[in-house]
Amino acid sequence: MPNQGEKRAPMFCAGPDARPGAALGRGERRKGSGMPSKVIFERFLWFHHQVGRSRYPNAAALAERFEVSAKTAQRDIEFMRDRLLAPLVYVPARRGYRYEDSSYELPGLWLGEEELISLLLAFRLASAVPDSSLKSSLKSFLNQVLSLHSHGPGLSLDMLSRKVSVKNIEYSKTDDKTFQQVLGALVHASPVRIEYYSPHNDECTSRDILPLHLLSYMGTWHIVAHCALRGGLRDFTLSRIRSIAPSDVKIEAGIGIEEVKDYIRRNFGIMKGGESFEVCLRFSSAVARWVAGQVWHPDQKAVHEPDGRMRLTFPAADLREIRREVLKHGSEVEVISPDALREEVRREIEKMSSLYR
């Protein structure tokens, strides 16, 4: 990133031929856009790097490198100086240019290696998104960004794909088209009509909803929306949406982000439900060290006992999800409290035991 106080050029500017009556060269500037095309930008980039490396480039060198006329090359240099605010100074003794301020960076080029790696990592993490076209667009964008930066041949999407993996547990598969339409309705705040399947009733119902928040939870995508039928917030699992189309129903939700966050807190995770209670679990010495590195809740407290066992205490509001987590650890964990959770786990173990008699 640029140092504080360094000179930055404008993010958006016209190309070097953007003057009244100027004819545009083929491929030189995107039609209908004031931004220089990649062809011109590559000339800027090369010249910028040459100046930065104290090689004192000039119009002749730029023209020879990119096989353009000397007049075009000189216009490029003048554009960098006048429109991109490059502090270019011509040095007669070296017959070339230098920067008066060495901290100058071209617009869009102040991404350092750390920022680029962050973008690449974000792409790998985006593998959980079911929309293949969205991931394809992101990949194309990142490749364009990388092509305009010189951080060595090792920094690429292929490199990161070889060195970083993201394994997602997909409990329910979401259709690409459904995801795209839900995301589009969410971004544009547009109501949609869905045919929604309920496994509890084994039937589909038609709902007019206004999407408010997209959530990926434990391998399943959900849309929290205002439902016109129910007159309030509801959670819809994307994999259960059988069809989706724009809706003519006007839905005025009038719901703020805090209300949506509160709904998610009450309906997802170990805090699902209403009032919270304290859970205390005792883990065996065999798994205590591993569990100690896990986050069950931000307010959890761990106490290590002399014999190597560990007591973990945290607030929760939903017995069902805690019960599932406890059962994952089998005989390596004991529920100390609350009694209701201890009883639910005991009953579940009895049911499991009856299957193997």
Image: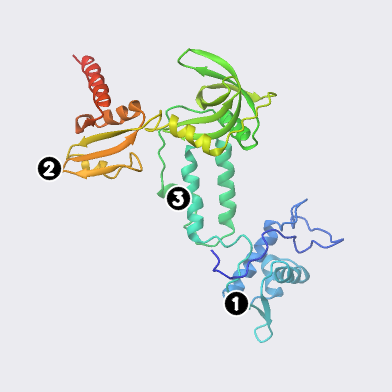
Q: CA distance from mark 2 to mark 1?
A: 69 Å
Position of 114 relative to 61 (above/below)? above
Q: Quadrant of the C terminus?
A: top left
Q: Secondary structure at mark 3?
A: helix
Which sits in the foreground, 337 or 93? Answer: 337
- Name the amino acid type tagged 2: Asp
In this rendering, would 28 be left or right of 189? right
Q: Position of residue 89 (x, y in %)?
A: 68, 79
Read off the residue under disc 1.
55
Q: Residue at x 56, y 31 (%)?
A: 179
In this rendering, would 356 be left or right of 5? left
Q: Residue 284: in sight, yes or no?
A: yes
The answer to which of marks 2 and 3 sits earlier in the sequence is: 3
Discs 2/3, front: 2
Q: Secondary structure at mark 1?
A: loop
Check the image and tell me how it is coloured.
rainbow
- Name the amino acid type tagged 1: Arg
Residue at the extreme left: 307
Q: Residue at x 50, y 30 (%)?
A: 222
Position of 46 relative to 147 (above/below)? below
| Quarter of the figure with residue 180 | top right
Read off the residue under disc 3.
160
Residue at the extreme front: 275
The answer to which of marks 1 and 3 sits earlier in the sequence is: 1
- Determine crowd level at label 1: few under 14, some 14-19, many 20+ residues with C-alpha closer than 10 A: some
- Determine crowd level at label 3: few under 14, some 14-19, many 20+ residues with C-alpha closer than 10 A: some
Position of 7 relative to 322 (above/below)? below
Which sits in the foreground, 213 or 217? Answer: 213
Checking the image for residue 307, the label placed there is 2
In this rendering, would 192 be left or right of 175? right
The answer to which of marks 2 and 1 sits earlier in the sequence is: 1
